[in-house]
Image: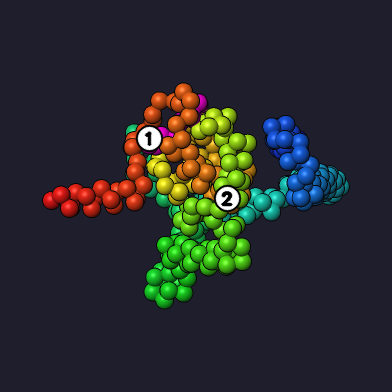
């Protein structure tokens, strides 16, 4: 009983310590403003109450067991017979599930094998092991019928494809209801109106200028005004970098900080910085990328010359 109390006390202590550490690492506003905080507190309270009830129930069972044993011993003394404690329900279940052979009956299952005085017993497999084996056979048959023979339940690959279809339908509905909120790297386009470019410039000055400079000439981050790009210069690739960041660099993912519309606007504004020739720009990094129009023009020129 003492071990059980110690275990649950340690478990409760670890839970409280983990919550305290998470609270210390996270900003104060993100914890106390969390709408799920009440739910977490209620679940924690229920968990603590459950542990207390479990401890009290365990203690009461121990008390009842001791009182029952004392009563049985007193009764045996009055009758003048030796007291023999009845095995507990758990002991009976354990012995029955393992089919133990009593020591006094081991001679009945002794085999004739003799290896340097070591004798072998003809013990059978425990019943729990055999029933587990039988259940695994039944499960495999049911699994084969439901998943492979009748297609009643989908296999993991089919389930994944079904979830993809549902996700695509949800994305389509979201895009139809709010096209701006559904912008991603697959459907992002270059914003051309002055208001969008101005918004992208403001986002750039607020979030990107500290690494790329206000004029885009590059500082900690690369130069955004020349023809050299590390991850591609089209709108989709720039949007991807802005949204997901670049692992292993100072470029963080901005997905959780600015809206998809602002990410599209700032990506469009970055394209306008190309060729602006800022003062004292950072040395080129990456490879030269040409817009698709220039690539097509060069291809036509080569074909014409041939």
Identify the residue shown where x is 56% and y is 31%: 214
Q: Position of residue 223 (x, y in %)?
A: 45, 31
Identify the residue shown where x is 44% and y is 39%: 274
Total labels drawn:
2
Q: How is the image coloured?
A: rainbow
Q: Position of residue 22 (x, y in %)?
A: 69, 35
Tell me if label 2 and label 1 are in contact, CB under 8 Å. Answer: no
Disc 2 secondary structure class: helix
Asked if the stretch drawn in magenta spans residue 219, the answer is yes
Indicate the quadrant containing the N terminus: top left, top right, bottom left or bottom right. Answer: top right
Quarter-wise, where is residue 145 in the image?
A: bottom left
Identify the residue shown where x is 45% and y is 72%: 146
Identify the residue shown where x is 76% and y is 36%: 28
Residue farthest toward the bottom in the current orientation of the protein: 150
> What is the number of the mark on residue 50?
none
Asked if the stretch drawn in magenta spans residue 101, the answer is no
* Residue 159 position (above or below residue 247): below
Q: Nearer the viewer, residue 228 or 101?
A: 228
User: Can you see residue 297?
Assistant: yes
Q: CA distance from mark 2 to mark 1?
A: 26 Å
User: Can you see residue 104?
Assistant: no
Disc 2 designates what residue?
194
Disc 1 secondary structure class: strand
> What is the number of the mark on residue 228?
1
Tell me the magenta residue range: 217-230
Q: Position of residue 163 (x, y in %)?
A: 50, 64
Q: Position of residue 138 (x, y in %)?
A: 46, 67
């Amino acid at each position: 009983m003492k071990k059980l109390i110690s275990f649950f006390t340690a478990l409760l202590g670890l839970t409280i310590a983990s919550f305290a550490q998470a609270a210390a690492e996270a900003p104060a506003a993100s914890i106390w403003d969390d709408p799920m905080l009440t739910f977490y507190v209620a679940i924690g309270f229920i968990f603590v109450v459950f542990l207390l009830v479990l401890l009290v129930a365990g203690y009461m069972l121990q008390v009842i067991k001791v009182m029952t044993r004392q009563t049985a011993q007193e009764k045996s003394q009055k009758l003048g017979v030796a007291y023999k404690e009845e095995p507990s329900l758990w002991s009976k279940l354990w012995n029955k599930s393992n089919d133990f052979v009593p020591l006094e009956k081991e001679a009945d299952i002794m085999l004739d094998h003799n290896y340097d005085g070591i004798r072998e017993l003809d013990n059978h497999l425990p019943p729990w092991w055999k029933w587990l084996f039988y259940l695994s056979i039944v499960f495999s048959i049911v699994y084969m019928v439901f998943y492979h023979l009748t297609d009643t339940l989908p296999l993991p690959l089919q389930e994944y494809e079904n979830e993809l279809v549902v996700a695509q339908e949800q994305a389509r509905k979201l895009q139809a209801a709010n096209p701006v909120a559904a912008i991603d790297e697959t459907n992002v386009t270059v914003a051309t109106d002055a208001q969008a470019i101005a918004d992208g410039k403001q986002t750039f000055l607020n979030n990107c200028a500290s690494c790329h400079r206000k004029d885009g000439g590059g500082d900690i981050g690369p130069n955004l005004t020349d023809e050299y790009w590390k991850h591609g210069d089209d709108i989709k690739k720039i949007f991807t970098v802005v949204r997901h960041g670049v692992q292993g660099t100072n470029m963080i993912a901005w997905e959780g900080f600015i809206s998809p519309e602002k990410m599209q606007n700032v990506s469009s504004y970055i394209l306008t910085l190309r060729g602006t020739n800022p003062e004292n720009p950072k040395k080129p990094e990456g490879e030269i990328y040409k817009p698709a129009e220039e690539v097509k023009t060069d291809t036509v020129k080569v074909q014409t010359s041939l």
